[in-house]
Amino acid sequence: MSAASRFFFLLGALVLWAIARSHRRLARALSRELPALKPLPVYPSVTVIRPIRGLDVGARENILALLDSAYPGELEILCILDSKDDPAYPLVSELIQSRRSNPRTRAAVLLADAPPPGRTGKLNAMLLGAREAKGELIAFSDSDTRPRADLLSKLVELLLSGPRIGAVFAPIVAVVDSPTVGDVGYALLVNAWYSPAVALVAGTQGELPFIMGQMMVFKREALEAIGGVGCAEGQLVDDMFIGKRVSEAGWLNVVSSRSVPIIIGRMGLLQFLFTFRRWVLFSQGGLPRDFTRLNWIRGILAWMAWVGLAGALASGHAAAAVLMAAAIAAFAASQLLLQRRWGGPRVAVRHWWIPAVLPLVAALVALSTRIWRTVDWRGRRYTLERGARLGSGSPGRS
């Protein structure tokens, strides 16, 4: 065996071992369970604020899932839209009217108008909801989520399980019935990359210096300590920034072992690429190095396998090329297995190429965020400065 053959063969073996080791660590992290929590003797009142703009996939079922929460205390649900012209307004109003029978749940629609320059539409809605909230605890729920009936009560139990816990949130799992190419890519980002990394970094106690805000609950004292959700003024990513401020103020952010489904569907390849790019920009808003380093290493391993395969094929080293191809296959299989363990959708054989090339696409997407600093989100366009901060005079609308 020549020196070049030995090099490619050893490189392939090293990459394959590293991929297997990474997979084992992430799979174990996804099996993490926080200590069992006892039901509370009395559940405090909660206000759940849901910013809504446009009709999400499965919008009707998403709204009904929130309205039908089996929370054992007083529950206030505030759905915040820009105006009555929003296509979601008649649907939200109709569903709220149809769910008036529960005397312990009050639901209403509030109109926030368009956000001022330098503020996202989501934060604008959150600010209005927080001002109007009557609950002892304040929760926020994204419109593309479909929380299970007992999720809110479990989050409240976790929040009140320790005096230093200021905020709790549910990790996300992307679900889809009949995934397209774009759906597969997005589901893998959430279920095989983002959520496993959260589980690993959070450890056995579930503590993190940031928040994933698709479903989060706060003690009012923690919000008051950071100046309220308005502290995220000028930020593209409110949840990560708010979580960072909560941590800096001496409170704990704790992630639940119970996930909240994000409903996706009908996502084309181009839409996925724009969504992927937005997620990369979001990640610049306060993710800790331990979190980003983990996924960078996984991406580098995939690149090493692809470059090694090209080098082995170009130099005619068949055995080394086979080992490199096995490393690429193992990397793709790891993502598919992690996704299934987390509760994500099965991926058809015709889409198995997607996890194999995802790190290659990620590098190009990350590069685009360095040279193109605008992002479209919920029908509005934002210009960004360093990190995920909105540029001065960013109109916050399309």
Image: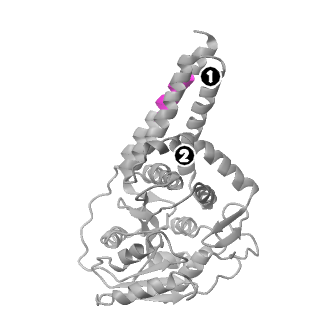
Residue 85 x, y percent position in the rendering:
58, 86
In this rendering, does residue 28 appear at all?
yes
Residue 346 x, y percent position in the rendering:
39, 49
The quadrant of the picture occupied by the N terminus is top right
Which residue does the image show at 45% across and 52% down from the upper left?
191
Q: CA distance from mark 2 to mark 1?
A: 27 Å
Which residue does the image show at 54% across and 85% down from the upper left?
128
Task: For mark 1, give the secondary structure.
Answer: helix
Q: Which comes before the other along the chain, label 2 or label 1?
A: 2
Residue placed most toward the observer, 87 or 112: 87
Tell me the residue that label 1 is attached to: 313
Q: Which stretch is magenta? A: 11-19
The quadrant of the picture occupied by the C terminus is bottom right
Residue placed most toward the observer, 237 or 186: 186
Task: For mark 2, give the secondary structure.
Answer: helix
Tell me the residue that label 2 is attached to: 295
Which residue does the image show at 47% across and 62% down from the upper left?
264
Residue 144 x, y percent position in the rendering:
47, 69
